[in-house]
Image: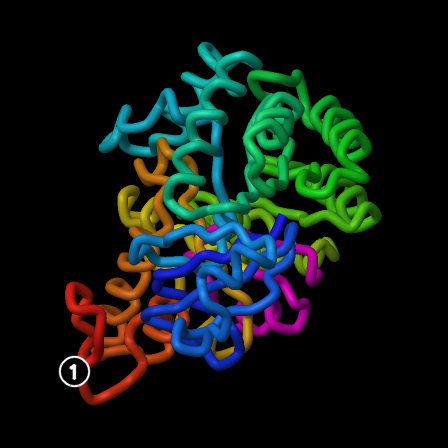
Amino acid sequence: MKTIITNSIIITMNSDMEVFPDGYVKIEGTKILETGPSCDLKETTEELRAAGWQIKDGKRGILMPGMVNTHCHLGMIPFRGLGDDCKDRLRVFLLPMEQKAMSRRMAALSSRYAICELLLSGVTSVMDMYYFEAAVAQVMDQTGIRGIAGQTLMDEGGCDASDADQSLSMAKELIETYRMHPRISGCAAPHATNTCSPQILKKAWELDTANQVPFTLHAAEMDYEMTWLAQTRGCTPVGYLDQLGVLSDQTAAAHCIHLTDRDIEILRQRGSGVCHCIGSNAKAAKGVAPVLKLLKEGVLVGLGTDGPASGNTLDLFTQMRLCAGFQKTIAMTEVPCLQKILFPWRPVREPGFWDWKKNRFY
């Protein structure tokens, strides 16, 4: 099928970060053939229709590449807004509630709701970490999103497994089931540096890297995680992961709030990425990740919402605004590099402004 979408604000996200305030996109099948300002479109409407093009009016909407939510817990929808100001919400509230109430059916229904929310807000790819991920992967497939279903591993087990070894076996089966799928893949996702043994962390990393899927976990997020590793291992979470040999370009570490300069250098050297979840971190008053330092040192940083029980929203636009606001507050100045990364669709022609109603620059 050949489709052309017209009358749209096109955000290309190409190397030049071009924005076409009145543009078009030509699509054939699953490939984007051409995009540009409407004034460059050579064919008339009649000629396009005669050539078999289906014309769709964008109605002045923003047309942009789908966004990626790098860290999420889709199944947490039933717990959104509950225990908001509960001290140590994870251990006191969330884990006990999941143990008592979460089931395969609830995980599937919750994930369906969450994925619909993601798609409606412009997110077309998500990396999930939760329980009953075989059911979650099925929902990902049915809804059409591109997803990585990360089976959670914890030494103490969870609502879907008695221990980490059983969860690891479930992850292996999940990876194998979706090995050839064009949109869905599975992975083993250890919960955190302080909830998984060194052996489980290594086994999970070996499984994920052997199958060329991401290795993801929470790291440098909790104050008690930092204290425990300092007292028992004499190092930071990033240093600990590096000692275990589980940091590579396939590693995506979620949160990474409490990083030293040495931690950042290790992440850069290993090519590991960081999933920044500012909405969740701010709600729980855990701290602010050093995003500016990470970017300056060349560490890849992606935005995540965390679970809907952690940040109360799956909207990445909210994360963009919070990320920019917090980083500018810490730096106590405007941060142009963040504006370029997070808000590339702002009008690039200066001086002047874009009058959306009259559809022209001034």
**Percent x, y of residue 349:** 28, 84
Instruction: Indicate the quadrant where residue 183 lies.
Output: top right
In-front residue for pair 96/77: 77
Q: Which residue corresponds to the image point at 81% horizontal and 33% vertical from the top-left?
A: 176
Characterize the local packing of mark 1: few (<14), some (14-19) or many (20 or more) Cα atoms within 10 angstroms: few
Q: Secondary structure at mark 1?
A: loop
Residue 193, above or below 101: below
Of residue 105 and residue 171, the one placed in the foreground of this image is 105
* Colour scheme of the rendered structure: rainbow
Residue 137 shows up from this direction: yes
Q: Residue at x 60, y 42 (%)?
A: 146
Q: Which residues are magenta?
A: 248-273
Residue hosting label 1: 362
Q: Which of the pair 156/152 is nearer the observer?
A: 152
Residue 153 showing in the rendered view: no
User: Which quadrant of the rendered structure holds the C terminus?
Assistant: bottom left
54 horizontally vs 137: left or right: left
Looking at the picture, does residue 297 appear above or below residue 287? below
Task: Find residue 59 and report its horizontal and vertical position in percent.
Answer: 31, 53
